Amino acid sequence: MVTDKKKDPFGAVADAVAAGGGKGQSAKGKGAKAGAGGEWVAPVPDDAPQPKRPSATMGQPGEVWAYRDADGRVLAYVARFDKAEGAKDLRPRTLWREGGKLVWKWQAPPLPRPLYRLDALAAAPAAPVLLVEGEKTADAAAKLFPAFVSMTWPGGSKAAGKADWKPLAGRRVVILPDADAPGVQAAAEVAEAARSAGAEGVAIVTLPDGLPIGWDCADRFPAAFSREALADLLAGALAEASRGAVKLPYGFTLGADGLFFTERKGESEHDLRLADGFEVLGLARNSDGGDWAVLVRFCDLDGRRKELVIPRARLASEAAAVRAELAAEGLFISPSRGKADRFAAFLAEVGHSCRWTLAQRTGWVDGQRFALPGDVIASGDGEPVYFTGNADALHYRKRGTIEGWQAGIASRAIGNRLLVFALGLAFVGPIMRALALEGGGFHFRGASSSGKTTLATSAGSVWGGGGPLGFASSWRATGNALEGVAFGHSETALILDELALVDPAEAGNAAYALATGQGKARAKQDGALRKRAEWRVMVLSTGEIGLADHMRSARLAQRTMAGQELRLIDLAADAGAGMGAFEQLHGAAGAAEFADAIKEAAAKDYGLAGPLFVRRMIARGQPSGARARELLADFVAEARRGGDSGQIHRAALRFGAVAAAGELATELGVLPWPAGTAKAAALWLFGRWAEGFGRTGLMEERQVIIAVRNAIQQNQARFGTVTARLTDDEESGPSPRAGEARSLVTLGYSHAIDMEPVYLLHAAGWDEVLKGFDRKFAAKALADAGYLWTDTGNRHKKKVRLAGNKPQPFYVIRASILEYDEEAGPETDAEADSASRAEWPSATWGDDWMPGDD
């Protein structure tokens, strides 16, 4: 009730006004009547002017209700003016600022409008909510059913869509309609609004037939329908909203005032208080039926609501540690040994009809439920899901509006193909299963201030923000820590900043681990294997250097495997327009100003587009997955060229997934782009990457050629010069340096023989140069490229007679390998190799080719 008559805008007596609540805000009056201007001022400041009394024509209000925020501060009032023949007129009154002055108006607050009694809601964070129609009815329900927080919305049955229902997120909601057709219709609309706002459970009371038309609980109860009968209906609806009921072990009672155990000695009984009051929300287990646990909820001493999952395995093995954790979160538990043991026994024995699915990682629990920290997106069917990951370490936060995100970030991507690609990448996670896509991602490489961080920030805003790096995480982490990070970003997007921060010796393994989606194998105490951690992630990485260059910077130089580079595809953060990653600045003075505008927008609106994408995918149902596969197939068909290697096709699938995600998000109205925008950007970027990578042949084959070329170029001093004899005559003594224990020997031919020189590598030299490569694969790669001389049987070693020595087996490498350009490929093909080899005098070679069994 309003107790400050100075702030009573109607001059009514204090005890004629009921207390209420609402979330405070100050907003433009766009939701007011047409022609209304100014700014709504809420909550009402202490220095606000006293409103004038109603005019003589309106009279004195019969009742006045104050809408308050969670802290009890007044936001608005609603007055009821009684008219003839029982009619009534409800009029809102709000405070506005016009021309620098504060003015009271008979005008509704802007949309969305606050709910009534939000202060009562804040004071009872664990209590169920009872929604009724009308402020008078809410006051009556609060007295009749104090276990509920009774609330209503402003404007009556036809205004349910104008209220702000967000405060009902996470609440169990029971709706009691008026006994008429408009009341039933309003209840259905309110139920849908509460579910959309994230209510934990919603149920509508079905009233019995025969009640007076328009009856509500503020009216006199009919003879055939008592308060107790209505209380039973509410209890049934609450059970439905709670999805179950607690089953207390023998001797225990649990209520708002605490957990008690009734101790019996002879004929006497004594209640022992074991702990503060809390709720048991249900029993939980993972999707495989293991890790059973009890889910509890309580409020700490400051009124903050806490929810904890208590594994029953821990109750059996370390009950004291469980009690310590609960106490640390603010739940009082009696320290007395006997009472503490009984508290643990209660948690071990309590039952519940509600079952929860525990989700340790983000992403799909099944095809219709998608788990995020603090937000499980579902179609409404199936049992509830509880996310058990460390939400505090992740940044799945929400802020602003989807319209603000679309205008501030997504719309600015039009004309900027790298930015389009980065945003499309952020939507791939939820369709990875539908596409049967393995994990992996893309690495944007560029110098400082090239725009790569802006690309990462934009992509991260799809799912969250508010952290030190927005939604992104740092590459600076151990292998085990990166597993945990991947676990928390499964089937969303994993943004990793600055590759140089990870140890170069671990970079390649990290890329493999993130992409393969499996953690390290670990053993239990009995030696049996634990279940591996699993995830699916689409990675967007940034850095000033690429993965290959970073790995080569290690003390022991490493070569990147093709699998590593295909799992984390390297892209230059340069669109080629002289503005770094950007092509169109949308009115900005320069690239730096454009990047700053996007970063500012990403700090204002974030965490909305990804969940909306999933929600609309679920609403569409199975066609979403089929459409994603169709979009991927269209991309691959257009991107394919004749002669493309399997590695190029594999990469095309990853680029195509980004195109499919972007196009699907456009079709679902999440991305405000013309159809084909995401596909065109992905095709352009794929073509640019494929030409640089090499569309034909395997990457490993090119690495073999490069390794041999570089070894010859960099180790000339380790080659000895000898002369090949065209006859079988033997000379006494060894050839120059031929007997030295050297890894490599070079053969220089006299000018009398008009043939190009070759380089001879014996087995030890071959192994040194091609360390890490398979012998057969390397020899075949060189032979196919025309750099390794072979005979018609494709045997890879040749016996060569050095002057004064018996024939020795060598790998014979053509000197033309020094001219190899990895961007252009080999200059000679197999036919040229065959023709050139035919010119060599047979006497140059030894008796036989060595078998190619190495």
Image (cartoon, rainbow, N blue to C red):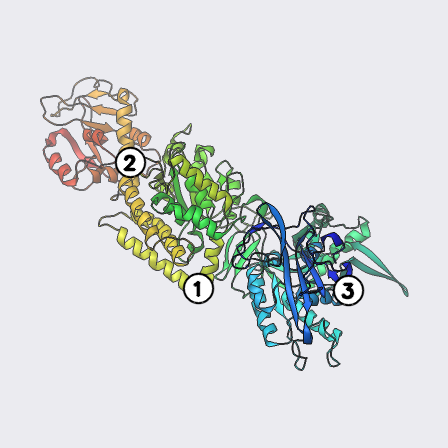
Badge 1 crowding class, 10 Å Cα cut-off, few under 14, some 14 to 19, many 20 or more, is: few
Residue 250, label in figure: 3
Q: Residue at left 64%, top 58%? A: 93
* Vertical relation: 81 (above or below) 634: below
Q: Nearer the viewer, mark 2 or mark 3?
A: 3
* Relative image position of residue 687 (x, y in whole percent): 28, 45
The crowd level at tag 2 (other Cα within 10 Å; few <14, some 14-19, many 20+) is many
Horizontal side of residue 542 vs 751, given as left or right = right
For numbered disc 2, what is the local secondary structure?
A: helix
Cα distance, mark 1 to mark 3? 48 Å
Residue with the mark numbered 1: 620
State the residue in front, 439 or 303: 303
Which residue is identified by label 2? 704
Q: Amino acid at mark 3?
A: Tyr
Residue 455 percent across, percent down from the top left: 41, 41
In depth, the one of 494 and 357 nearer the eye is 494
Work out whether 358 lies above or below 696: below
Q: Is residue 545 left or right of residue 235?
A: left
Q: Amino acid at mark 2?
A: Val
